Amino acid sequence: MAYMKDSTGRRLDSIAIPAKTEVADFSSVRRNLRGAAPKLEKWTVPIFTLGDQGSTFLTIQWPWLVNVVAETGAVGKFGETYRIYYSTDHEGSTARIGLLTATNLTGGWTDRGTIYQDTSSGNQTETEAVVWNPVEQLWFMYYHQVGVTGTTAPETTLLATSANGVDGWTRVGVIIDYPSDDLSGYPPNPGIGYFRPFRIGNRWYAHALLAGGDYARFLLAQSPDGRKWTVDPRPLGNMSEMVGNTVRVEWNSGTVIFWNGEYLWIGLVSNFTSGGAGRVTKYVAASISPDFRKITAPPVELFPGTLLPWETSPADNRSGGSLIVDTDGRLVLAYSGSTTKFGLAIGV
Amino acid sequence: MPLMRDNAGAIIYPARVKREWIDNATPGTSAPGSAFSVAAGTYSTPSGWSGTSNQGRASLTTGSVSGNAAAIKGNAPLNVINTANFNALSLTLESLNIDADTGADFEMGFQGIGSLGGASLMHLNGAATAVIRVRNAAGAITDFPTNFTIFQASGGGRSRRNVTFLLLPRGYMGDNRAFVYILEDDQTMAEVDISSVYTTAQNVVPIFQTVTRTAAARIMSWANVKMAFWHN
């Protein structure tokens, strides 16, 4: 074996190796780490308030953001690019779902009032999630309803469809109910609502509430078409190892996106309090396993620090928001800053 | 200290060798064999599969006097475990439930001989949430709060669930803190650092039990008992 030589013919083993003078540069590492936790900035003023609302909602919560053009390839019924569906929260027979439309994210949101209220059986039509089904060319709206005849759980998730996502809704009916024959296999306080669907290719997934109360359990469901849903028998829980012992993951107040090469869950974590009094929520981003069941790293708080002046204090009843990856690649989060105001946060 | 998980979310345990003992309660089988025995209560051998709501689950019934227990314990001396010998120890009860939502205590974990020492999950009658109970060699008790529940005011005791008590006597490599995790299926429901009061080098036996706190019997049922240890 010949000696390796440099271009001048010197044997390489005769060349003195200079002392290392480099300084380790971790800047790319920092960039990568930062990339794993998206940064969003809030608009300083609410984009919509209850006072702007034309009909008689008592509260406005559960904003669900959609880019109509990105989903369907065309503007919506009112010429809009963006929609925010919203609903009341725990309002019983006056509960309903409303709609805001806009051509730009940053302004000119127009309230279209009530677009849907299920009066065929039960009430409390709330916590809508509206997804374009490209196969059927229909908007699928999931919502929950209380007291639906023939159901086991007091609160169940239903589906309605519409060609334009505004009117002409067809009530499909209950898609997930509690089992009636083996109730002991599932947690107490059954309540299947707050359905948060997302689609990976042609498989549909959803996180939702399974059983309520302060020590709630959540569910993961799958569907091949958005109509027929099957529920994973293993409840989703707290993920204490990642969020700590005093905080729970609110699986029913989040969104799953694919971001910088990994799946992220972006949603609310809270103390173990359901309902209004004493509930404290924070928006976080967390890596989630590809089976969408486990938070795999401690979440990063998206908006650390003080709240904006119009947002309510931490002891609040903020509902979950919704997040999209917009056509320009930016993340956009529509969120509930109080029970009467919506805010917007845009990726930077 | 978070449990280590792979990219799919599966737990990576702190040692490479897993020793597992599984008892499937099937029709006709006796109390969990070889490693365990009935310490208190009346054991019911699972009958066939055909009865109403009968999935061949085993059960153990307390007496009907408040304070009566129904308990399964590891056999001594063969199955006494020195927790310093292992990096992780787990006890899993599948399809576990009690026949009532209130009026009982429930405990599962690894307990010292004579109830001195060890660590366990304990949900006391009337408490909103369960605790991790650590006993020292003198019997002194330290309870660490969790937000996990077996019983709830609105139910819970009767709900069948798969619960795992996982003890890491000295954490992951180089950590040397003792941690307890409560798992429900693949979900972490509680994580507690017990290193301030837990003695790693101590002998324990696995235990699960319910104690009635009313003048009525309570029945604890389960389908599978799984015990696992990890070491290198």
Image: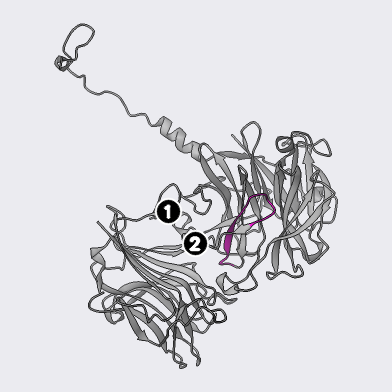
- Chain at tag 2: A
- Residue highlighted by disc 2: A246
Identity of the amino acid at label 1? Ala
Quadrant position of the N terminus of chain B in the picture: bottom left
Q: Is residue A20 left or right of residue A238?
A: left
Q: Is residue A217 magenta?
A: yes
Q: Secondary structure at mark 1?
A: loop
Q: Is residue A328 left or right of residue A1?
A: right
Which portion, as a residue range, is magenta?
A: A214-229
Identity of the residue drawn at 33% across and 79% down: B73
From the image, state whether disc 1 or disc 2 is nearer to you: 1
Identity of the residue drawn at 55% across and 61% down: A271
Q: Residues within 10 Å of mark 1 (few under 14, many from 20)?
A: some
Query: Residue B113 is drawn in which quadrant?
Result: bottom left
Q: Residues within 10 Å of mark 2 (few under 14, many from 20)?
A: some
Q: Is residue B215 left or right of residue B72?
A: right
Residue situated in front as seen by the camera: B18 or B217: B18
Where residue A153 appears, as percent x and y from the top left, is 68, 69
Where residue B59 appears, as percent x and y from the top left, is 45, 82
Q: Is residue B22 magenta?
A: no
CA gap between label 1 and label 2 equals 23 Å
Quadrant position of the C terminus of chain B in the picture: bottom left
Identity of the residue drawn at 50% across and 73% down: B150
Asked whether residue A234 appears in the rendered view, the answer is yes
- Chain at tag 1: B
Asked whether residue A320 appears in the rendered view, the answer is no
Q: Is residue B108 above or below residue A48?
A: below
- Residue highlighted by disc 1: B10
Which residue is farthest top?
A8
